[in-house]
Image (cartoon, rainbow, N blue to C red):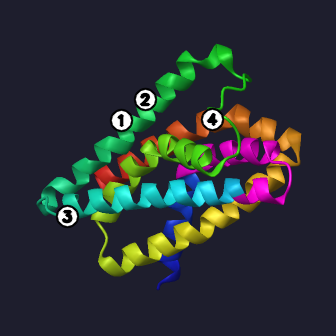
Amino acid sequence: MSPELVARAVGLFAVTNVDDLVLLAVFLGRATGRAAVLRVVAGQYLGFAAILVAALAGALGAGLLPEPVLPYLGLLPLLLGLRAAWTAWRDRRSAGEDDVPGPGPGVLAVAAVTVANGGDNIGVYVPVFAAEGTGALVVYCAVFLVLVGVWCAAGRFLATRPPVARALARWGHVVLPVVLIGIGLVILLG
C-alpha cells in the first residue's frame, strides 16, 4: 500500500464528498441524543456502501472496454461538473434556503439522501476504479470506509459550529463543479 495511493484515495474522497459533509452537518445538527447520532452514522455508512457497490460494478463493466476508450470515461465527471455548475448558477437566487430532503435523521432517510446525492460520486469513481488494479481498489474502498467515519465526526463538529456550517453551505456549490470538471479533465488527458 503506497502512501501515494492512499493520498489519492483521500483526495478523491474529500473532493467528491464536500456536499455530503454539509448534509451530514445538517442531519447531525437535527440529531438529539446518542441514538439519533448513531442512526445518522449508520445511514451514512449504508448509503456510501451502496455507492461503492455501484461504482465497483460499473468499474468491472468498464474493465471490459478497450484500453484506448478508458480516457473517454472522463467525460462523465466533466459533464457532471458542468451540470453542477449550471445548477449552481441557475439556483443562485435561492442560496441560503434549507431544502435538504428527508423526514429526519433516520437510518433509511440518511442512506437514501446519501445515495441520491452520490450520483456524481459514482460517475467519478467508475472511471478511476476502472483504471486501477484489484489491490488499488481494495485500498480505495478501505480508505473511503474509514473516511466515512471521519466525515461523520467532521459533520458533528460542524453541526455544533453554525458559522462554519453556513460557510460550507455557501461555498460547497462552487467547489463541487470545479473539482468534478478538474477530475474529468485529468482522466481525459491522463
Q: Closer to us: mark 2 or mark 4? A: 4
How many marks are shown on the rendered structure? Answer: 4
Question: Callout 3: helix, strand or loop?
Answer: loop
Badge number at residue 102: 4
Magenta span of residues: 16-38
Crowdedness near tag 2: few (<14), some (14–19) or many (≥20) residues, C-alpha within 10 Å: some
In x, y percent, where is residue 138? Answer: 41, 77
Q: Closer to us: mark 1 or mark 3? A: 3
Badge number at residue 63: 3
Residues at marks 1 and 4, CA–CA distance in whole angstroms: 27 Å
Residues at marks 2 and 3, CA–CA distance in whole angstroms: 26 Å
Q: Looking at the image, which residue is at 57% across and 51% down?
A: 17
Question: Callout 4: helix, strand or loop?
Answer: loop
Describe residue 26's horizontal placement relative to residue 15 as left or right. right
**Amino acid at pointer 3:** Gly
Q: Give 66 or 141, whichever is nearer the viewer.
A: 141
| Helix, strand or loop for the magenta stretch, by majority | helix
Question: Callout 1: helix, strand or loop?
Answer: helix
Residue on which disc 2 sits:
83
In x, y percent, where is residue 161? Answer: 88, 46
